[in-house]
Amino acid sequence: MTTVAASDPVDAGPPRLLLVLTGLYLAQAIPVSLFLTAMPPILRQEGVTRTALGYLGLLAIPGVLKFLWAPLVDRMRPIARAHRAGWIVLTQIGVVLAVLALLLIRPGDIAGFIPIAFAIAMLVSTQDIATDGYATLALAPGRRAAGNAVQSGAAAAGVVLGGSVGLLLYHQFGWSGMVLGIAGLCLLPLAAVPAMREAPQGGDAAGPTPRPRVSAFLKRPEARRILWIALLFRASEGLVKPMEAPYLVDAHVGLDTIATLTGASAAVAGVAGTALLAWLLQRRGPAAALGLVGTLRVLACLVFTLHAAGLLPGLPLLFGAAALQTLIRTTELVVLFSLFMDVASPTQPGTDFTILACAQYAAFLFGSALSGTLADSFGYAWLFGLGTALSVVVLAGSMVLVSGRRP
């Protein structure tokens, strides 16, 4: 590996660039969806206990802590003529090999499965740093909304390929057939790498490039402002979202209805929702887009609160609120990630973006960890009411913070 100065990707034009980003984000989404969507029911069917399945939560650790090694990815060039492309190639090959390593264990071997899955989580997290850094540099400010909409769409496609297709392959061809099929799918996004355009290695003649550091991010007031938004905005979602499906079950809604509702709202969010938010973000700016998403979240949480308290009978509005929450979860990332790109320094784009991405993910996980305990201790109405109140506070605080940004 060699140490490099900041490398600015060469603009390859919007259509080509968006296709490249689709492939790069799809590369991450396929293995992640395999382990989050397909593997839990497969492992459960193979007799793995629910306690053992709880250990899958360890796979979130790299996603929360990847900011610690993000400066290394920004600084080091693993292949002589390829900086971020080099990281992407090496990590994706590692992902394919790790997926193939699943052939060495039986489906119910949770002790063998967790280390392999954790290795894949580490590789995907490292690749994400390189991909986000590349996207931050390559996307001009006016194109970032569209680029992040593409990211959300690629994530939705990854759920289908890694999750749904993985389950179908297992059902039709068994463990080995599924592993080989997913490994093959993980190879396909590598076709996007040759189309990446990065500037040649070289420093600035005016002086040395600053060394990427987490502390450099924290010294910038504008960066700290967006960090607060990242920490606040998804906290209320973490409290409410994990308990939505259990509440629908306890409200005597059938699993087939829940599956249909979730799938339909995810499809709408993946296409229409992200397109609408990208348009609003580009035309009206981040304050308007963030305000819309935050307001919709308050309304959705309020519907769940009123229904749980027995003040809103019937299911139609509840179904609408559940669908709205799915749409919000997808579209809010378009807004947040565009803000993250705006504040990221060109000398350490992967580091800055990753710090913010880790912050919003950690906030969501913290809320999720509390949601079940709060629901068991105080009931659904109290939990959803707390989520509603927190959503109002977060909306107001986020509006103040984003309005205070420098243009």
Image (spheres, rainbow, N blue to C red):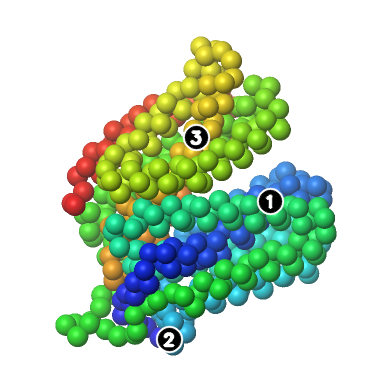
**Between residues 390 and 152, which one lies in front from this camera angle?**
152
Name the residue carrying label 1: 164
Q: Earlier in the sequence, mark 1 or mark 2?
A: 2
Q: Is residue 148 left or right of residue 119?
A: left
- Residue 190 % position (x, y): 56, 73
- Most foreground residue, 340 or 277: 277
| Type of amino acid at the residue the image marks with label 3 | Gln
Q: Residue at x 35, y 57 (%)?
A: 144
In the displayed structure, 82 sits above or below 316; it is below
Q: Earlier in the sequence, mark 3 or mark 2?
A: 2
| Amino acid type, residue under disc 2 in the picture | Arg
Q: Which mark is residue 81?
A: 2
Mark 1 and mark 2: span between their CA atoms? 37 Å
Can residue 153 be seen?
yes
Q: Position of 148 compared to 212: left or right?
A: right
Residue 365 in the figure: left or right of residue 57: left
CB under 8 Å between discs 3 and 1: no
Residue neighbourhood size for the residue with mark 2, other residues' Cα within 10 Å, grouped as few (<14), some (14–19), many (≥20): few
- Name the residue at 44% across, 46% down: 274
Find the distance from the CA under tag 3 to the CA under tag 2. Answer: 44 Å
Residue at 69% in and 63% down = 182
Q: Is residue 274 above or below residue 63?
A: above
Inter-mark Cα distance, 3 to 1? 21 Å
